[in-house]
């Protein structure tokens, strides 16, 4: 910001970007501009801070996302934004957000900052990254023969699931059709009865 000329011939400058006001005394315009440019109270090229790189958002589970980025030399911390709203200022290189809605898409960006003369100087924002918390894939699926030609299907419960759908095909490359919808997170067993086999 260039200084303004007062009536008494003294040049006065009011700093910007939240820095304290200050007065510059000079007898000519060139001298005032030089003082303004070299003043340590106003961020200059050497005080600029780089944008964090390598930002990514990873789904941890059905309601949790982890945002991470690379270190910026000279940074005192980083601010994390979700959908345009500031979430947290952290000194680390990652931020984990809990309590998210399963199936919803969240957009994140980060900016670094450092303190210069008691005031925060910010980098530009990173690019946006997206993440959508989803349920984990069902694992540990096993099929055992039961009595009277039944098939007993079991699997491991999935954190956050409200139920499970069981599908069956009658051949290796056959079409799968839904056999049963089981309610409850702990419903991890299904018995396929003889009449179901005979109906296909």
Image: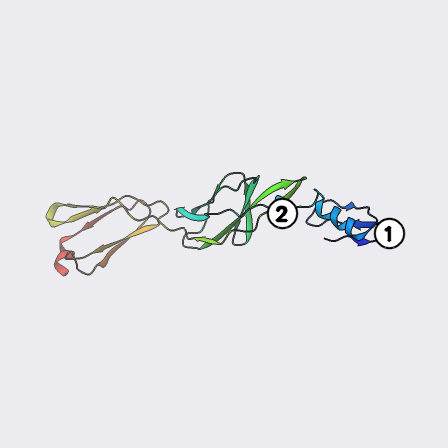
Measuring from the top left, give residue 118's x and y in whole percent: 67, 39
Q: Which mark is residue 9?
A: 1
Measuring from the top left, give residue 160's x and y in whole percent: 37, 47
Measuring from the top left, give residue 40's x and y in whole percent: 70, 42
Q: Which mark is residue 45?
A: 2
Q: Is residue 171 above or below residue 122?
A: below
Which quarter of the picture shows residue 168?
Answer: bottom left
Rendered residue at 74%/48% (across/down): 34
Rendered residue at 62%/44% (across/down): 46
Alpha carbon separation for disc pair 2 and 1 = 30 Å
Q: Nearer the viewer, residue 76 or 155?
A: 76
Q: Is residue 167 above or below residue 53?
A: below
Q: Is residue 4 left or right of residue 101?
A: right
Rendered residue at 28%/43% (across/down): 156
Q: Tell me which numbered mark, 2 or 1, is placed earlier along the sequence.
A: 1
Q: Is residue 42 left or right of residue 194?
A: right
Which color scheme does this rendered protein use? rainbow
Q: Nearer the viewer, residue 73 or 155?
A: 73
Element on which disc 1 rests: loop
On-image quarter of the C terminus: bottom left
- How crowded pointer 1 is (Cα within 10 Å; few <14, some 14-19, many 20+) is rated as few
Q: Is residue 163 left or right of residue 151?
A: right
Farthest-out residue, right: 8
Element on which disc 2 rests: helix
Measuring from the top left, give residue 129's x and y in whole percent: 46, 53
- How crowded pointer 2 is (Cα within 10 Å; few <14, some 14-19, many 20+) is rated as few
């Amino acid at each position: 910001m260039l200084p303004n000329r007062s009536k008494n011939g003294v040049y006065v400058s009011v700093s910007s970007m939240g820095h304290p006001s200050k007065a510059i005394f000079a007898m000519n315009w060139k001298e005032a501009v030089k003082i303004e440019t070299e003043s340590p109270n106003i961020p200059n090229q050497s005080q600029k801070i780089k944008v964090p790189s390598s930002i990514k958002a990873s789904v941890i589970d059905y309601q949790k996302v982890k945002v991470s980025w690379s270190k910026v030399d000279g940074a005192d911390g980083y601010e994390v934004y979700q959908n345009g709203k500031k979430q947290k200022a952290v000194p680390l290189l990652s931020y984990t957000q809990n309590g998210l809605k399963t199936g919803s898409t969240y957009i994140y960006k980060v900016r670094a900052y450092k303190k210069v003369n008691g005031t925060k100087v910010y980098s530009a924002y990173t690019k946006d990254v997206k993440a959508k918390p989803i349920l984990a894939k069902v694992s540990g699926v096993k099929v055992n023969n039961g009595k009277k030609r039944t098939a007993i299907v079991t699997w491991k419960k999935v954190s956050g699931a409200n139920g499970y759908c069981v599908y069956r095909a009658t051949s290796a490359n056959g079409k799968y059709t839904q056999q049963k919808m089981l309610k409850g997170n702990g419903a991890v067993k299904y018995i396929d009865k003889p009449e179901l086999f005979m109906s296909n």
